[in-house]
Amino acid sequence: MKFEEILNELKKKIFHPVYFLQGEEAFYIDEISDYIEKNVLSDSEKEFNQTILYGKETDILTLISYARRYPMMSSHQVVIVKEAQDLKYFGQKDKESKEGKDAKDPFLEYLAKPTSSTILVFCYKYKNLDKRTKIAKAIAKDSVLFQTAKLYDNQLPDWINGQVMKNGYRINPKASMMMAEYLGNDLSKISNEISKLILSIKPGDEITAAMVEENIGISKEFNVFELQAALGKRNIYKANQIVNYFGANSKNNPFILTSAQLYSYFMKLLMYHQLKDRSSNAAASELGVHPYFVKDYETAARAYSLPTCVRNISFIREYDARSKGINSANTSDGQLLKELVYRIMH
């Protein structure tokens, strides 16, 4: 089932005996399990009918014993297994036991006939079960299975826009792009930062780039977003200012993250050169950016020809490898970035 489908059912008090929430992106897993934990039972019902277990601290037989209990003075009981990926049972290989093919598996037996008054929730984070195993096949057949994946980088600004709008606010395109670039694709982290930002504004107000800089600790003048802008305009003086700042503050501006952003930037610029339709909306769709930024790529395309973009991508790959110790004689991150930016712009 999809995230919205599960949440809508829960809000309508439509419950299933077993939920298996798995995948690389923990945000949606937490959203569903937190909703169940906070809303299915009343505060008085939770005292006797809600159990929170942790994968490392329990085993499958103990878990099933909890699941088979009946609720007290309530229509349901809730059993949530957090960090279920640490439950040893799920780590075992799908092998025949000593008893042979017909050996009974207590968990598979429970899945086939679960206690209808129990809501059993597994939070299996950062990976997925092997679909080829009996366990995974049984879960897919006999439970509500939800699977989530990490968002791609180019999907993050739209996701940020959606989260902000859902809370009744607006966000400037530059602000959402900055958040995406600096916070990465950890949705829980981004959600927390959005919550902090909206505390200081009124409903309907807009989150600006200046607010993001101030509240998330991004230097207003010296950040990778401004470095890209300086490179796009071939502003050598500004680019060198930012490079020197990064070199002096390498802990907060690691080379590996800067090079990844520059790689993404020049890849998009390379794509822009090959577009047949360079109108704002068409280009934005192809590049995976907000139309607001298309004019920046148009400017940069005049500064860097298609062959130059290819050359610069090659430079970035070379220096990324050097930052990881390949063909490099202990050169500092600051010096590597200085050399890279020089070669890009000359």
Image: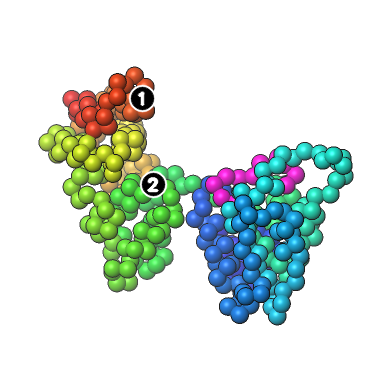
Which residue is located at x 12 percent, y 36 percent?
Answer: 237
The reply to whether callout 2 and callout 1 are in contact (CB within 8 Å) is no
Q: Element type at marker 2?
A: loop
Q: Position of residue 1 (x, y in %)?
A: 62, 56
- The vertical placement of 279 against 301, above or below, is below
Find the magenta span and give its range: 124-135
| CA distance separating discs 2 and 1 | 24 Å
Residue 67 position (above or below residue 313):
below
Query: Which residue is label 1 attached to?
Result: 325
Give the residue at the far top of this rendering: 327
Q: Which residue is mark 2?
A: 184
Is residue 54 at all visible to an observer of this figure? Answer: yes
**Element at badge 1?**
loop
Residue drawn at x 27%, y 25% as measured from the top left: 331
Residue 128 position within the rendered picture, expressed as x and y whole percent measured from the top left: 61, 45
Say which quadrant the C terminus sits in.
Answer: top left
Identified by mark 1, the residue type is Gly
Can you tell which of label 2 and label 1 is closer to the viewer?
1
Please state which amino acid type lies under the numbered disc 2. Answer: Gly
Kindly identify which numbered label has been placed on residue 268: none
Mark 2 vs mark 1: which is more N-terminal?
A: 2
